[in-house]
Amino acid sequence: MSLPDDSRYLKGGPVAQRIIAAVREDAAIAKAEGFPPKLISITVGDTDAVDVYVRNQRAKAQLAGIDFEERRFPATITSGELEAHGLNADPRVTGIIIQRPVPAHISVKTLQAAVHPLKDVEGMHPASIGNIVYNQLDLAPCTAAASVELLKETGLDPKGLEVVIVGHSEIVGKPIAFLLMSEGATVTVCHHMTRSVAAHARRADALFVAVGKPRLIKADMVKPGAAVIDIGINSEIGPDGTSRIVGDVDTDSVKDVASWITPVPGGVGPITVAILLRNTMVALSRQRALYEATYGTADRLAAE
């Protein structure tokens, strides 16, 4: 979908292209030095929506010069059987991606925690999220990092910036809060028990929204001149009966109040996959340091 040529829109495509270009350079150097990056995608069961995500990840990985392999497992597999496939111990595997959703009998949190932190390119292992509290920010959850990346596109200085986050999930809202606090922002996090979300939202210089409620944020809830980062992805049936994707922000009204706003789709989404690839190179760097410390060589393949 093409977006209007409007400076108020924070479009994710150009940012993603810059990130992927930088990753491609790093991946080429790593390959030349004997450290080819490789991603393994884990899909459990058959889900059409997952297929779309995997195709997109594969295409972007190839563009960045990162090897991508999909492994599919039947819906009847158990968590224990998945964990026994040895990917954590395989030195040829840089990162592991768990595609969602997974069957109801499998806990995605347990599965994510089973991925070794050094191969957690999604930034969702408890250790990865915990590291953000200690200002180790280079391996953050992809969507959270992508959202912060878009805020930086505005040129606003995060130091002292009044930030309000509507939504406090472990992989989006909370990591965004810690990422921005580390850069000096003053952060308020709203959730389902917040008494007046509107009162908090109206004082935000930068407003992040990730709750899964279509058009929750209206124009009267936004401070004039604010930056609005809409992370929501919702399917909505229009008057003509067709389905379309909308965010958690009523974009048509809010764009006349805000100075910047992310379109949905076309905002945070494209950057999320780019961050996944950037995280892959961060993970590779950490693994490389471990191999060099262990084997005293830059060529991990020679060390096997």
Image: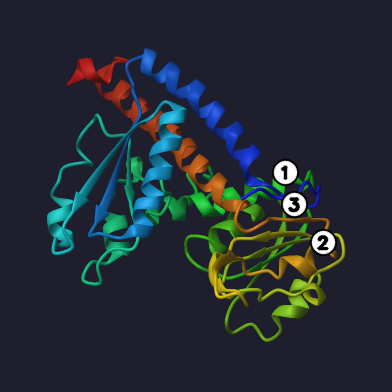
Which mark's residue is nearer the viewer, 3 or 1?
A: 3
Q: Can residue 31 be seen in this view?
A: yes
Which mark's residue is nearer the viewer, 2 or 1?
A: 2
* Left or right for 16, reference 281: right
Amino acid on which the number 3 mark rests in the picture:
Tyr
Q: Alpha-carbon neighbours of circle 1 within 10 Å: few (<14), some, or many (≥20)?
A: few
Relative to 178, residue 23 above or below:
above
Q: Which residue lies furthest to the front in this view?
A: 240
Q: Which mark is residue 258?
A: 2
In percent of the image, x 77 and y 50: which residue is there?
A: 159
- Earlier in the chain: of badge 2 and badge 1, it is 1
- Earlier in the chain: of badge 2 and badge 3, it is 3
Q: Is residue 212 visible?
A: no
Secondary structure of the residue carrying tag 1 is: helix
* Left or right for 166, reference 241: right
Q: Residue furthest right?
A: 224
In percent of the image, x 71 and y 70: which residue is there?
A: 250
Q: Mark 3 points at which residue?
A: 9
Amino acid on which the number 2 mark rests in the picture:
Ala
Give the image location of residue 273, x and y in percent.
48, 44
Q: Alpha-carbon neighbours of circle 2 within 10 Å: few (<14), some, or many (≥20)?
A: many
Which quarter of the rendering shows the C terminus?
A: top left
Give the image location of residue 275, x and y in percent.
51, 42
In percent of the image, x 29 and y 16: which residue is there?
A: 299
Give the image location of residue 200, x and y in percent.
75, 75
Q: Residue 120 carries which label?
A: none
- Residues under labels 2 and 1: Cα distance? 15 Å
Q: Name the residue under label 1.
A: 153
- Residues under labels 2 and 3: Cα distance? 10 Å
- Residues under labels 3 and 1: Cα distance? 11 Å
